[in-house]
């Protein structure tokens, strides 16, 4: 009887660990940045951007995020921070030159992940996940697009939503 209970327990744990094969990535570009100093390569968000960052947190309120990744720039970190605070998650910095490498794939497998980037890195990241060049760089004034990429076993799908 103990062996049967042990086998049942082991099978249940194994099933729980392997059943969630679906990974969902939510990719956004940083919110509106301060453009008053054209020489500043690491600007903060402007007032509109700070408001949008709060709106992103509200959007993700009903989504159970497991991790939040951001490039290490003021504007991306400030965009991610309200969501991270509301989810009690630490923002993990990623290097946009090493997007979707094997380590990232292992850490995020089976999870729901928010990734905050830039107009040139966000669609490139989506394309790397999909394994095809589907999306072009975003327009410089596009701060409201949300790319949703789902990876389930060998199937990969993507959609874009506008979140105003």
Image (spheres, grey):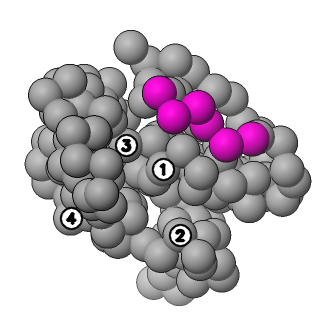
Sequence-earlier tag: 2 or 1: 2
Sequence-wise, which precedes: disc 4 or disc 2?
4
Secondary structure found at label 3: loop
Q: Which residue appears at 43% of the width and 72% of the height? A: 94
Q: In the image, is residue 58 above or below residue 16?
A: above
Q: How many marks?
A: 4
Residue 30: mark in rendering: 3
Looking at marks 4 and 3 on the same chain, the residue that comes earlier in the sequence is marked by 3
20 inside magenta stretch: no
Sort mark 3 into few (<14), some (14-19) or many (20+) by Cα contacts within 10 Å.
Answer: many
Q: Quadrant of residue 148?
A: top right
| Quadrant in which the C terminus is drawn | top left
Q: CA distance from mark 2 to mark 3?
A: 14 Å
In three-dimensional space, the C-alpha distance between marks 3 and 1, rounded to whole angstroms, equals: 6 Å
Secondary structure of residue under mark 1: loop
Q: Is 2 displayed left or right of 68 in the figure?
A: right
Query: On the image, numbered disc 4 is attached to which residue?
Result: 90
Q: Residues within 10 Å of mark 2 (few under 14, many from 20)?
A: some
9 sits left or right of 148 in the view: left
Query: Which residue position holds label 1?
Result: 118
Callout 3 touching callout 1 (CB < 8 Å): yes
Answer with the quarter of the image where residue 159 lies.
top right
- Report the residue at 41% width, 51% height from top: 116
């Amino acid at each position: 009887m103990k062996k049967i209970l042990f086998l049942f327990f082991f099978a249940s744990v194994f099933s729980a660990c392997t059943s969630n094969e679906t990974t969902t990535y939510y990719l956004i570009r940083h919110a509106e940045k301060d453009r008053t100093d054209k020489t500043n390569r690491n600007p903060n968000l402007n007032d509109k951007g700070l408001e949008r960052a709060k709106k992103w947190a509200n959007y993700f309120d009903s989504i159970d995020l497991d991790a939040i990744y951001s490039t290490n720039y003021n504007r991306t970190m400030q965009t991610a921070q309200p969501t991270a605070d509301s989810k009690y998650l630490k923002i993990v910095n990623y290097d946009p030159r090493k997007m979707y490498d094997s380590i990232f794939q292992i850490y995020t497998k089976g999870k729901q992940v928010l990734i905050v980037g830039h107009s040139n890195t966000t669609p490139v990241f989506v394309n790397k996940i999909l394994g095809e060049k589907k999306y072009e760089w975003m327009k410089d004034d596009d701060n409201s697009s949300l790319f949703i990429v789902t990876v389930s076993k060998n199937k990969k799908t993507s959609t874009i939503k506008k979140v105003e």
